[in-house]
Image (cartoon, rainbow, N blue to C red):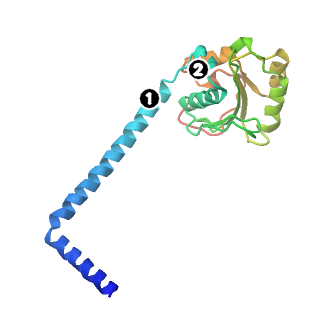
Amino acid sequence: MLAALSVTAAVAVVNWLLAHGWVLVVLGVLVLSACGVRIHRGRRRSRWEAVRARGLRYELSQLDGLHHSQFEAAVRDLMHRDGCRGAVRVGGGGDLGADVKATDPYGRRWVIQCKHRRHGLAGSAVGTPDFQVLNGTARQVHGADVAVIVTNGRVTAPAVAFAAQQRLHVVDRHTLAAWASGSRPLWELLRAVPPPRKPTALS
């Protein structure tokens, strides 16, 4: 009984639509218009994000005032600005020495440990133990080509020496200021960065 009623209702609907074909046309136009609006908005958002990324700048005073998680997000955004489209923030409990991961346009895998100091140079210095953690996990665990510690504070001289011995990179307050407030990618500001993994239009 219910099946017969369902068939009858379906036939009635089909007959009505056939008799009023303009309804289908209107519905089709509405659907296409909605899709067009979504596509346009998506493209406009992508263009806006690209412009924003190219123009992203931070002053040190801004970075000093961030929470440590916001500082990690700022470093991620700066890597994205430099063309690392896959830059992600992964910091948190159990991050194993990685707060930000990114692959640059040359195919190099970056693993970054962020050390935020709310009081800048007056805060505690980043020391050798911090670099030892990075050295123990960046390449072996995370597959880094470039292992970096970024801080808005100070780095001890022994830590700088250890980093040089272990091919780790230091982005101290001075380098961070040049990177964050300028337009040059980080790999142009650091020495002895590994060669590109792959040829690109930039090489």
Q: Secondary structure at mark 2?
A: helix
Dot 2 crowding, Cα within 10 Å, few <14, some 14–19, many 20+: many
Q: Is residue 138 left or right of residue 27?
A: right
Image quarter hosting the N terminus: bottom left
Q: Residue furthest top?
A: 122
Q: CA distance from mark 1 to mark 2?
A: 16 Å
Say which quarter of the image contains residue 105.
top right
Residue shown at 25% from the left, 54% from the top: 30
What is the tally of numbered marks visible in this picture?
2
Q: Is residue 87 visible?
A: yes
> Which mark, residue 51?
1
Q: Is residue 100 left or right of residue 133?
A: left
Q: Position of residue 181 (x, y in %)?
A: 56, 17
Q: Are marks 1 and 2 in contact (CB under 8 Å)?
A: no
Mark before the other along the chain sequence, 1 or 2: 1
Q: Is residue 141 left or right of residue 68?
A: right
Q: Nearer the viewer, residue 51 or 99?
A: 99
Q: Nearer the viewer, residue 3 or 167?
A: 3
> Which mark, residue 180?
2
Q: Is residue 194 left or right of residue 200?
A: right
Vertical order, 159 against 112 (above or below) = above
Vertical order, 165 against 93 (above or below) = above
Q: Nearer the viewer, residue 139 or 26?
A: 26
**Residue type highlighted by circle 2:** Ala
Q: Nearer the viewer, residue 69 or 162?
A: 69
Q: Position of residue 132 (x, y in %)?
A: 84, 30
Q: Position of residue 149 (x, y in %)?
A: 73, 26
